[in-house]
């Protein structure tokens, strides 16, 4: 009996000692990240059966287990990876938000100052200081575009560098995880029934740290190791082996640093950015594709549309030297054109064909004239787009039949009216097509289109150029069916127009892409039409005399008229190089018998007639001829005359300056729904809304992470008060067991002395 008492005391002593050791370990690691509270699992020994019953044989400690819940830990990891993504996203998007909305660094003040300069010139068109002030404001606007774009470029470079740093950190974690897996195998090899708790905690902490950088999934293997995967199942840890990630330039876009997985054979497999979600890396990737790309593309689109629109209007004017206006803004790739020809178009490094693609943004007006000799419509391109025009100015670039249609530069022009009468030239149907205008003003019919037979030609046109240009990037893939264009902003597959002029080209959403060479199936290209436009915009004029504030013609009424015929100052609708500059005075003579105006003067004006259907005496009659618009009014008498003349001394003419100033409040952006300043405000608003969205989402995810972490701490965390109580409890158990051994020893001594 004494021996049993001593044995029971000894087992209790050892169990209490194990409890004290485990408790002290908990206390020592109370502040260790990832540590899970441990506790001993104590059971009774097999009791001894006697005739008097079963007598206990003491206790034993089966194992030391950690208090751990994989479910709660999974909840923490799911929330923490979202917190990491939102924090990284917020840190980046706040920089754009602060810059774009800054009253001194943003674009809005520069836009306002530029149009104020235009208004000052309109108020005093002969003033050289006012013109110089306008050029200074234009230069400041171009510089502001460049400055904002440079900041975005620098942020893009910073994101690329952070991605590289993230890849280095992730590789460090994966190599450590593989090493811990090896240690766990070794620690478990002696006794597979006992868990190496501290190593398991260390591994879980590494997994949580890795999960904060990029979302991971795990799978526990039979040998106790954990395999780790990213993306849609790419392994970065398999047992005791780790696979490195590589930060490298994208095969499709060298401006972007992407992540690749280095395979066993040394090849690097580029991972889809959309699959790398969660954590800091996911936040950086999402910010770049969702906000940075969009903001820079939209800024570039404003630069393109502003330059094209201002240039197109400026080209309709006349400067102080009496010459037609040139481009006020320009881009280095096409300095003599009001077209933006420079775009980012990258061929994938994996392409096997030798096709070369070039692209440019479209912004052209057109003249469509009925050719009675061929019974077709001839199409003339009116913009200064020498890169696309196959013939000299004034030459038709294409023709289409009466009742038919044609696609030019992505613009579909269709005859929707009755066939025009085949009267003698030049009294034939003519139209000005302005694809960037709203639908109601996209086609302007010449006022002399009213033929004697009563047949009236009518054209319709789709939109292209600045109105159709989006802020998206595009992927162009060559398939067995030909080139396929995908708009990357929403992954929509487009149906691009294939044009006969120029050959081997496709046109979509304001962009024309030309192909040379031989592609192969699988070849791919990335097109960024406006990504760097804000960087490239410059001012093309330095001489204030070259500001085209006036119009290239003037009007007057013959002093010998007997009626009250009147003609307003008129304006330019578009520049028809066959008709403007005027080759001399154009005379309009009224014939009361037919209520028509006969036109005489230089080609192509001579011989045309403004028919009776276009003029009603006593009313305001808007007349459009060869790109010039004027209003005839009053009650003319037979033989009364009005004149269109070259504006040889129009230094005080402000008609074109007024038209330039009107562009400030004209809705030419976003499908003719926004002005330039409103379009920029939309960028600011989008970034601001995204900043608020990420802020709110981040706070919500942080709250979830805190709740999940609190639940883990409540279960697995070390409570020092509880551990202190356990320490006292195990100390008392130790002392009691020691006392039991002492009692047993004395009983044994008494027994020995009794029998001795």
Image: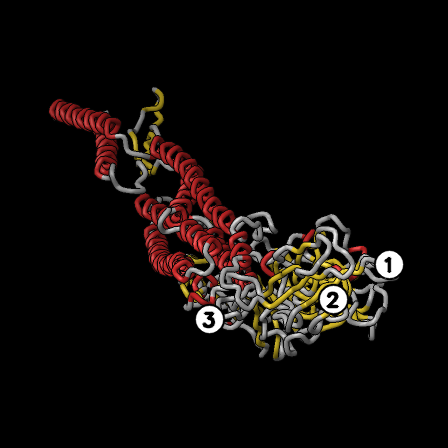
**Pick the front one: 64 or 276:** 276
Q: Nearer the viewer, mark 3 or mark 2?
A: 2
- Which numbered disc, 3 or 2, marks the residue that appears first in the sequence? 3
> Residue 547 vs residue 563: left or right?
left
Crowding at label 2, few (<14), some or many (≥20) Cα neighbours within 10 Å? many
Mark linked to residue 454: 1
**Pick the front one: 736 or 163:** 163
In the picture, residue 134 is in which quadrant? bottom left
In which quadrant will I find the C terminus? top left
> Residue 585 vs residue 188: left or right?
right
Which residue position is annotated with label 2?
599
**Pick the front one: 644 or 373:** 644
Where disc 1 sits, the SS reads: loop
Identify the residue shown where x is 60% and y is 50%: 672
Q: How far apart in space, not on screen, are marks 1 and 2 (Cα)?
A: 20 Å
Q: How far apart in space, not on screen, are marks 3 and 2 (Cα)?
A: 43 Å
- Which numbered disc, 1 or 3, marks the residue that appears first in the sequence? 3
Mark linked to residue 332: 3
- Which numbered disc, 1 or 2, marks the residue that appears first in the sequence? 1
Q: Nearer the viewer, mark 1 or mark 2?
A: 2
Asked whether the beta carbons under mark 1 and mark 2 sit within 8 Å of each other, the answer is: no
Crowding at label 1, few (<14), some or many (≥20) Cα neighbours within 10 Å? few
From what the image shows, is residue 383 above or below residue 493?
Answer: below
């Amino acid at each position: 009996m004494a021996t049993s008492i001593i044995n029971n005391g000894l087992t209790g002593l050892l169990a209490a000692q194990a409890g004290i050791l485990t408790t002290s370990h908990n206390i020592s690691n109370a502040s260790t990240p990832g540590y899970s509270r441990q506790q001993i699992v104590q059971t009774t020994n097999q009791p001894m059966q006697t005739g008097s019953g079963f007598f206990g044989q003491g206790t034993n400690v089966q194992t030391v287990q950690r208090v751990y819940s994989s479910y709660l830990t999974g909840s923490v990891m799911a929330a923490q990876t979202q917190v990491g993504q939102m924090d990284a996203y917020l840190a980046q998007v706040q920089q754009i938000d602060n810059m774009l909305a800054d009253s001194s660094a943003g674009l809005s003040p520069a836009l306002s100052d530029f149009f104020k300069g235009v208004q000052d010139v309109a108020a005093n068109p002969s003033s050289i200081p006012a013109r110089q002030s306008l050029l200074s404001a234009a230069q400041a606007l171009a510089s502001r575009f460049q400055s904002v774009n440079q900041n975005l470029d620098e942020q893009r470079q910073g994101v690329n560098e952070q991605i590289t740093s993230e890849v280095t950190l992730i590789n460090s974690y994966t190599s450590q995880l593989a090493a811990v897996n090896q240690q766990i195998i070794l620690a478990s090899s002696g006794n597979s029934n006992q868990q190496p708790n501290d190593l398991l905690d260390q591994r879980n902490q590494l997994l949580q740290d890795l999960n904060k950088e990029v979302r991971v999934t795990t799978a526990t293997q039979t040998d106790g190791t954990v395999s780790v995967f990213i993306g849609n199942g790419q392994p970065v840890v398999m047992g005791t082996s780790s696979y490195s990630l590589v930060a490298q330039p994208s095969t499709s876009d060298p401006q972007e640093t992407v992540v690749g997985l280095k395979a066993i054979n040394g090849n690097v497999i580029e991972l889809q950015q959309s699959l790398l979600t969660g954590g800091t890396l996911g936040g950086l990737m999402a910010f770049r594709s969702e906000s940075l790309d969009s903001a820079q593309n939209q800024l570039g689109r404003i630069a393109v549309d502003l330059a094209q629109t201002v240039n197109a209007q400026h080209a309709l004017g006349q400067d102080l030297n009496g010459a037609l206006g040139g481009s006020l803004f320009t881009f280095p790739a096409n300095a003599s054109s009001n077209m933006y020809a420079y775009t980012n178009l990258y061929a994938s490094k994996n392409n096997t064909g030798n096709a070369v693609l070039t692209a440019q943004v479209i912004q052209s007006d057109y003249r469509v004239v009925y050719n009675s000799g061929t019974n077709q419509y001839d199409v003339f391109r009116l913009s200064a787009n020498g890169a696309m025009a196959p013939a000299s100015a004034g030459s038709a670039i294409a023709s289409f039949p009466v009742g038919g249609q044609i696609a030019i530069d992505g613009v579909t022009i269709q005859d929707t009216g009755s066939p025009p009468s085949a009267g003698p030239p030049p009294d034939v149907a003519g139209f000005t097509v302005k694809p960037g205008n709203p639908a109601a003003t996209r086609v302007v019919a010449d006022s002399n289109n009213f033929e004697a037979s009563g047949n009236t030609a009518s054209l319709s046109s789709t939109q292209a150029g600045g109105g159709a240009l989006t802020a998206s990037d595009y992927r162009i893939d060559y398939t067995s069916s030909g080139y396929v264009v995908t708009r990357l902003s929403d992954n929509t597959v487009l149906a691009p127009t294939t044009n006969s002029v120029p050959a081997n080209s496709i046109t979509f959403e304001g962009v024309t892409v030309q192909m040379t060479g031989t592609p192969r199936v699988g070849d791919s290209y990335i097109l960024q039409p406006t990504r760097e436009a804000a960087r490239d915009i410059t001012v093309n004029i330095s001489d204030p005399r070259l500001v085209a504030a006036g119009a290239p013609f003037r009007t007057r009424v013959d002093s010998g008229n007997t009626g009250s015929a009147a003609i307003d100052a008129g304006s330019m609708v578009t520049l028809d190089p066959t008709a403007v500059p005027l080759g001399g005075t154009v005379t309009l003579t009224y014939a009361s018998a037919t209520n028509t105006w006969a036109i005489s003067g230089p080609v192509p004006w001579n011989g045309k007639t403004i028919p009776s259907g276009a003029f009603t005496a006593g009313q305001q009659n808007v007349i459009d001829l060869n790109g010039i618009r004027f209003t005839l009014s009053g009650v003319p008498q037979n033989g009364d005359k009005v004149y269109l003349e070259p504006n040889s001394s129009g230094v005080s003419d402000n008609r074109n300056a007024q038209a330039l100033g009107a562009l400030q409040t004209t809705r030419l952006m976003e499908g003719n729904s926004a002005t330039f300043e409103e379009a920029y405000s939309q960028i600011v608003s989008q970034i601001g809304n995204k900043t608020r969205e990420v802020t709110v989402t981040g706070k919500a995810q942080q709250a979830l992470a805190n709740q999940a972490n609190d639940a883990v701490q409540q279960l697995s965390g070390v409570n020092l008060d509880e551990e202190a109580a356990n320490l006292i409890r195990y100390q008392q158990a130790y002392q009691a067991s020691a006392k039991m051994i002492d009692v047993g020893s004395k009983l044994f001594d008494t027994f020995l002395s009794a029998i001795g």
